[in-house]
Image: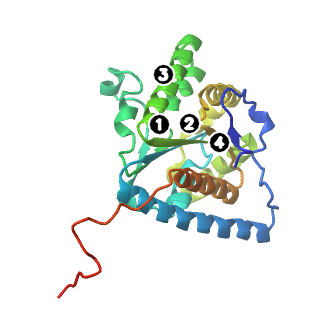
Amino acid sequence: MKKYQIKADNQVTLSKFDPDDTGNFKKTVGDKEKAKALTKGYIEKMGQLQERLYASGKRSLLIILQGMDTSGKDGTIKNVMSGINPQGCQVVTFKTPSEQELKHDFLWRVHYSAPAKGHIGIFNRSHYEDVLITRVHGKISNKVAKQRFDQINEFEEMLSENGTAIVKFFLHISKDEQKKRLEERIHDPEKYWKFNAGDIEERKFWQDYMEAFEDMISVTSTERSPWFVIPANRNWYRNLLVAQIVVSALEDMKLKMPPAPSDIDFATLKIE
């Protein structure tokens, strides 16, 4: 996992990360099945740890997913989080701010959506959109972007100090892989619903987005709220890494089931 974690104050160059990386696994059917089996084990462990998180009600976990269009944010949620009890999990997607939201600071709607104690929150895109698409399209200046980076770091530090662990994933795909996935949406009737003409337009700004992501990750990866650059060309390896990292974050909380009520003697309790 440490191979993919960005240390605080490290300058990130995404071209140094291979989107097609599969770690110690070969790109064979056998190794792919081994990775899937490991992922299944992590998903089962995640479910057990989530139950402790929910029962204790003292901590929370925020998972942030960012990446280019087709990078696999939805697929990660569908597959990796399949063992989580929906009762203790909330998925939030941040789209274009509403008129009401624009009357407040850009983090206003985000704080409202942060996970409650005992819960896991998943942001499918997040407050980082406000230093990505806005910057790429010139809607904010570099000065404002820097201010927002500082505000994001302070916001996430505040969440951390109040019991919310944060893990942030940049799902890193290649431009060729994105082309392949967009073409699948065009040619497969089962995927028509996923197609958005705007994705093709945004693709024209690929390099601008890469530079914006590099700045974002470099400035906002902290000791408490680290970024992980996840190679995402291979869905099975992406799922394994994300599952492993989420389980590690939950294990670090050292979660325990709450103690039994002191006024009940379970050893002698009988139900007629």
Q: Position of residue 220 (x, y in %)?
A: 59, 28
Q: Position of residue 127 (x, y in %)?
A: 48, 31
The three-letter code of the residue at mark 4 reads: Phe
Q: Which mark is residue 228?
A: 4
| Residue contact between numbered discs 4 and 2, judged by CB atoms under 8 Å | no
The three-letter code of the residue at mark 3 reads: Gln
| Residue contact between numbered discs 3 and 1, judged by CB atoms under 8 Å | no
Closer to the chain start, of discs 2 and 1, is 1
- Gap in Å between the C-alphas at discs 2 and 1? 7 Å
Residue for badge 1: 160
Quarter of the image for the C terminus: give it.
Answer: bottom left
Answer whether residue 46 is visible to the viewer in this image.
yes
The three-letter code of the residue at mark 1 reads: Ser
| Residue contact between numbered discs 2 and 1, judged by CB atoms under 8 Å | yes
Residue for badge 2: 224
| Residue contact between numbered discs 1 and 4, judged by CB atoms under 8 Å | no
- Gap in Å between the C-alphas at discs 1 and 4? 17 Å
